[in-house]
Amino acid sequence: WRAPDIDVLCSPRDARRLIEALHGEVTPDPGEGLFRSQVFGQILTTPVPLDVMANMDVRAGGDWVPVTFSTRVPIVLEDFTVFTPSINEQIETCRLFGRPKDLLRAEMLEGLRG
């Protein structure tokens, strides 16, 4: 299985810098639908596309709920480190999003818990 894209959540400043550095494009967010972000951009110049978001919210019922993480797990890749939320937090977030593809991702992540 291969991820169709990678979601990157960061500060507004870092989101703009990353999008610019990798020749992506900032897209204005109308704030309608299931998600909204202060900054949103897609980067299609990488082997796996990146969706970059800052200050992201998800609609839960009639309310907007901030998407935040309290864990940071370091992943060492060759000559740099990236941080990802714990598997448990990723599962919780996928369930919060609730779309079929998110629920499938949660199920797949369950298999990584062991």
Image (spheres, rainbow, N blue to C red):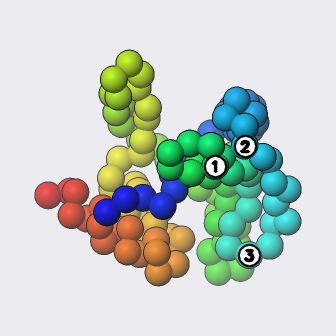
- The local secondary structure at tag 2 comes to loop
- Image coordinates of residue 51 in percent, x first then y, are 62, 52
- Image coordinates of residue 60 in percent, x first then y, are 62, 74
What's the mark number on residue 44?
Answer: 1
Badge 3 density bin: few <14, some 14–19, many ≥20, Cα 10 Å: few
Please name the amino acid that badge 1 sits on: Leu
Q: Quadrant of residue 23?
A: top right
Mark 1 or 3: in front is 1
Eyeballing the image, is 9 above or below 113?
A: above
Q: Residue at x 48, y 61 (%)?
A: 4
- The local secondary structure at tag 1 comes to loop
Badge 2 density bin: few <14, some 14–19, many ≥20, Cα 10 Å: many
- Give the Cα separation between the discs numbered 1 and 2: 7 Å
- Image coordinates of residue 64 in percent, x first then y, are 70, 67
Residue 98 in the figure: left or right of residue 87:
right
Please name the amino acid that badge 3 sits on: Gly
Q: Nearer the viewer, residue 10 or 44?
A: 44
What's the mark number on residue 24?
Answer: 2
Q: Residue at x 80, y 73 (%)?
A: 32
Q: Quadrant of the N terminus?
A: bottom left
Marks 1/3 in contact by CB < 8 Å: the verdict is no
Q: Residue at x 59, y 55 (%)?
A: 67
What's the mark number on residue 33?
Answer: 3
Q: Earlier in the sequence, mark 1 or mark 3?
A: 3
Marks 1/2 in contact by CB < 8 Å: the verdict is yes
Please name the amino acid that badge 2 sits on: Gly
Q: Quadrant of residue 28?
A: bottom right
Residue 79 in view (yes/no) = yes
Q: Quadrant of the C terminus?
A: bottom left
- Give the Cα separation between the discs numbered 3 and 2: 23 Å
Residue 95 in the figure: left or right of residue 26:
left
